[in-house]
Image: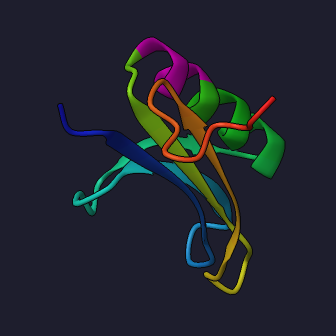
Amino acid sequence: MSRNVYHVVHNSDKEVWQVKKEGSSTAIKNCDTKNEAIDYAVELAKNNKPSQVKIHKKDGTIESERTYGDDPCPPRG
């Protein structure tokens, strides 16, 4: 089963944070704050497992990643 990948990215033209599904140029949602976009992307990911959320900085580089469902590197313990 393939993994759904959601990106939280900044759109400097519109001055909003966007949630986008990987492979799509269209935003699923525009948000006023980065935290609002992260919360929305995490909910999408949790409801559509296996999924991953990639959170980007304003400059486009990846700040962090979160995996839901099929984490390829689960913690040992």
Residue 33 seen in the figure? no
Residue 19 appears at what percent x and percent y?
Answer: 51, 47
Q: Residue furthest top?
A: 47
Q: Residue furthest front?
A: 77
Does the magenta segment cover residue 55? no
6 on left or right of 23: right
- Considering depth in this image, is 43 or 4 the residue closer to the camera? 4
| Occupied quadrant, residue 62 | bottom right
Residue 56 appears at what percent x and percent y?
Answer: 66, 68
Q: Quadrant of the C terminus?
A: top right
- Considering depth in this image, is 4 or 57 the residue closer to the camera? 4
Residue 44 appears at what percent x and percent y?
Answer: 48, 24
Residue 25 seen in the figure? yes
Which residues, given as a range, are shown in magenta?
43-47
Q: Quadrant of the N terminus?
A: top left
Q: Is residue 34 above or below residue 44?
A: below
Residue 25 appears at what percent x and percent y?
Answer: 27, 63
Name the residue rendered at 53%, 18% in the picture.
46
| Occupied quadrant, residue 42 | top right
Name the residue rendered at 32%, 38% in the picture.
4
